[in-house]
Image (cartoon, grey):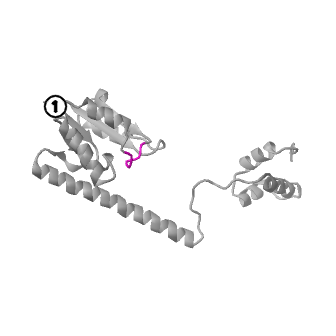
Amino acid sequence: MGKLIGYARVSTRQQDANRQVSDLLHAGVRRDDLYVDSGVSGGRASRPKFAKAVAALEEGDTLVITTLDRLGRSTQNMLVFAKAVRGRGAELRVLNLGGGVDTATPMGSMVFTVLAALAQMELEIKRERITDSVAKRRAAGKDLGGRRQTFTDSQIRNAVRLIEGGEPATQVARDLGMSRATLYRRIRELPQVTSI
């Protein structure tokens, strides 16, 4: 019997793969045989740790992932990756499917293709919902999040005038959409303004 090679992936550096790693270890993958890509989108074909995981596979080994979408976002990508695993004489095990999907057999290959297509459809539905939500928020004039606007030195000087005129600094900062500490920092950074 071959060994288990585990692969985990998170799309952004802010996310962590702890849950995936824990599930893979619980499934019997040794920590030394675990490969994790952090900050790598599922849409990218180039994944350094995935390439190392596939390269580590020998005949009889099993690549273990927690969910099918860890392989990729499109059915085509997933089928290419499954072919690479099969080409090494290895198997693929997807934990949330309750076991292995043997892509070497016609039935296993068909099941994998259907599941890959469903995973891609799920992603496209999610993307559609997000696009619809953003359009509705934009139409309603609501905040879309993202990077906050930057303020010009002139706007900060006007804020200083308001504070010097008796307005509370907390209220002026709130009206600008920033914290009081950020406002004070921006005031200190202004040329020719020493204090309030």
Name the foreground residue: 26 vs 185. Answer: 185
Q: In this view, does 149 lie to the left or right of 123?
A: right
Q: Can residue 94 be seen in this view?
A: no
Point 75% across, 50% down: residue: 183
Res 163 → quadrant: bottom right
Q: In this view, does 51 lie to the left or right of 139?
A: left
Q: Does the magenta stretch include residue 35?
A: no
Identify the residue at the far bottom of this view. 140
Name the foreground residue: 167 vs 12. Answer: 12
Q: Name the residue under label 1.
A: 59
Q: Mainly helix, strand or loop, the magenta region? A: loop
Q: Where is residue 76 in the image (x, y as percent from the top left)?
A: 28, 52
Q: Is residue 159 visible?
A: yes
In the image, residue 179 sits, relative to residue 2, either above or below, namely: below
Mark 1 falls on what kind of element? loop
Task: Find the magenta span and give its range.
Answer: 40-44
**Looking at the picture, which amino acid does disc 1 mark?**
Glu
Q: In which quarter of the image is the N terminus?
A: top left
Q: Where is residue 3 in the image (x, y as percent from the top left)?
A: 19, 30
